[in-house]
Amino acid sequence: MENKKENNPSGEKVKSVLPIRKLCRNFKRFLMLWIIAAVTIIAVIGGSNILSNISNREISIRVNFSFDGVESGHDPSGNKFEVNNIKSKSAIENSLKNLDLEYEDTDELYSSISISGNVPANAISRITSYTSMYTSEDINTSKRIQDLTYYPTQYTITMDCSKVDLDFSDCVNFLNDLTQQYEQTFFSDYGYKKSLENTVTAIDYNNYDYIDAVSVFDSSLLSLQDYINELVSKDETRFRSEKTGYTFIDLSKSIEVIRTDDLDMISSYITINNVTKNKQNLIANYQFKAQELERQKKIYEEQLDALSKTIDTYEKNSVLIFANTINDKDTTVTHSSKTYDDLITQKITVQKQLSNCQQKMNMYNERITALKGSDKQGSEDKVKEDFDKINEKINKLISSVNTTINEYYETIALKNAYMILSVASDSVFDIIIESLRESLPTIMAIEVIAAGAYIVLCMITVNEKIHAMISKVMSKLRRKNKKPAQ
């Protein structure tokens, strides 16, 4: 003992080493206690969630959306995104029909399904830690107000099977089919607008006088061409279809050829030779349309004038930034307003409508003049033959348009826009796995707290008095546990 004192005359080294040794002994001493606590936490939280899901007969599916605008709460078209469309009444009816299930009360099925957004922890932290811009010394932009809002991109769709009169396996199949069907609905709503295609292919020239049939064909093809040109402006990948070999520019040019060459050729023959089913009826029809367009033109002119005046007097939203010092000046920042932008969009639309109205008026007046000034009669058989040829050409083009645009949306524009991350299952094993997955965030949070408590306990018991007190308590507990055994 004396030698030890000589080697450590001040005793400082012994004091610095002994606590570390005690701390290591405490880690070892309380390790089993911490392991038992950790296992208990997992068993209690995970087990209760498993029992709850099995007893409540709840099933769930997770889906994810990934497209421009979803983070702002907008759908691909720029409108408010309605995630509840997944469980729309029509979708429920279609799923029941697909699975050959008879269920009269679709409202009951609708109310049994709930859709909740999954908000990540970083978003919660950002929102809860937000400092009001009115109490902050630094004001950057008004966009900081928007940081209080978060729109989920991932959702959990849950069905309470106890609320419906269906077998558990039927509930599982129903919910899986419902979410899978929505993929087709999503592409139908936000992908290729087949209504444009149907407008063109549904035209039967036999229902119109010949020159009117040309106008209907041209108008429908023009709408389709405008849509394709819109895709050209949005597509930054210069997409070329692997199935058809076409780009959007190719398709637009093909439509333009049909409009300027084929349709113009038929139109010129009909106009020059006055090919018509009933000349007097056609003149009367054109006169009526010209008068209607004249009235519509006045309406557009009034709308355009009102919009122009509103835009000229409209004041954009502004944010006043107060100066930090006396010498600095307050600054007013004017920024874009959605209302102002909408007014500009409306003005452009009305201008376009006014222009189209004037062009149609001129066309009808020219046709009236041509019909009244000539008695020449062309061949109706030739016109019918030309229409048959152009019909065939348009149908082939529409098929290429359909294939190309669908491929574009599926592989580029809306690729992974809607994904099913997990499906519902009637397997007990799958229910257990999914229940544990749902419980994982809670388990991890409590396990971190338990680990912190374990470390704190090991550190504070290095103190001799606290160590003695805890040892006394634990010895009493051991004595109590031994009494029943004796």
Image (cartoon, rainbow, N blue to C red):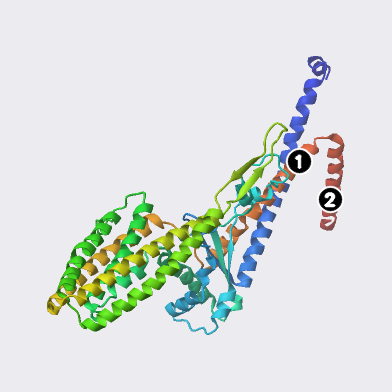
Mark 2 and mark 1 lie on one chain; the one further toward the N terminus is: 1
Left/right of residue 32 with respect to residue 106 in the rendered view = right
Q: Is residue 421 above or below residue 107?
A: above
Question: What's the distance in space between the residues labelled 2 and 1, CA to CA?
Answer: 22 Å
> Mark 2 = which residue?
477
Left/right of residue 205 with respect to residue 170 in the rendered view = left
Whole-percent x and y of residue 259? 23, 64
Q: Residues within 10 Å of mark 2 (few under 14, many from 20)?
A: few
**Residue situated furthest front in the rendering:** 373
Q: Which amino acid type corresponds to the residue marked 1 in the rendered image? A: Val
> Mark 1 = which residue?
456
- Number of numbered labels in the structure image: 2
Whole-percent x and y of residue 78? 48, 59
**Marks 2 and 1: which is nearer the front?**
1
Q: Which amino acid type corresponds to the residue marked 2 in the rendered image? A: Leu
Quadrant holding the N terminus: top right
